[in-house]
Amino acid sequence: MAQAHALRLVEVRAALSSGEAQRLRAAAQLSISEVANECGVDQSTVWRWEKGIRKPRGIAAIRYGALIAALREHFSAPAEAA
């Protein structure tokens, strides 16, 4: 399980440094506050992550990584016919 967490940290930090995490959040029309609530952190923490001031750590980073992975999957999935 520790290896899976480490890999999630690598993925989320790469998504943050490339700007992908912020782009996905914006595309999903999620506010920083909404993401912060989902991760169990203060909105200033998410802002610092997205600005590269701090690196996400611990369970909050794992939650953030899961959210980013879900958004990535959502936006890469082909649209269903109406």
Image (cartoon, helix red, strand yellow):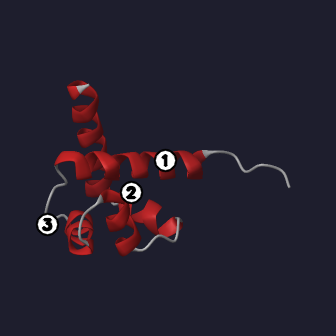
- Name the secondary structure under disc 1: helix
Task: Residue under label 2, please give it.
Answer: 20
The residue sitting at 53% across, 65% down in the picture is 28
Count of labels shown?
Answer: 3
The quarter of the picture where the N terminus appears is top left
The kind of residue on which mark 2 rests is Glu
The kind of residue on which mark 3 rests is Ile
Of mark 3 and mark 2, the one earlier in the sequence is 2
Task: Residue under label 3, please give it.
Answer: 53
- Labels 1 and 2 touching (C-beta < 8 A): no
**Could you say where residue 47 lies in the image, as x and y percent from the top left?**
25, 71
**Could you say where residue 56 lies in the image, as x and y percent from the top left?**
19, 54
Q: CA distance from mark 3 to mark 1?
A: 24 Å
The residue sitting at 28% across, 29% down in the picture is 4
Left or right of 74 on screen, residue 80: right
Q: Depth check: 5 or 81 in front?
A: 5
**Could you say where residue 54 lies in the image, as x and y percent from the top left?**
13, 62
Task: Residue under label 1, please give it.
Answer: 70
The kind of residue on which mark 1 rests is Ala
The residue sitting at 25% across, 52% down in the picture is 60
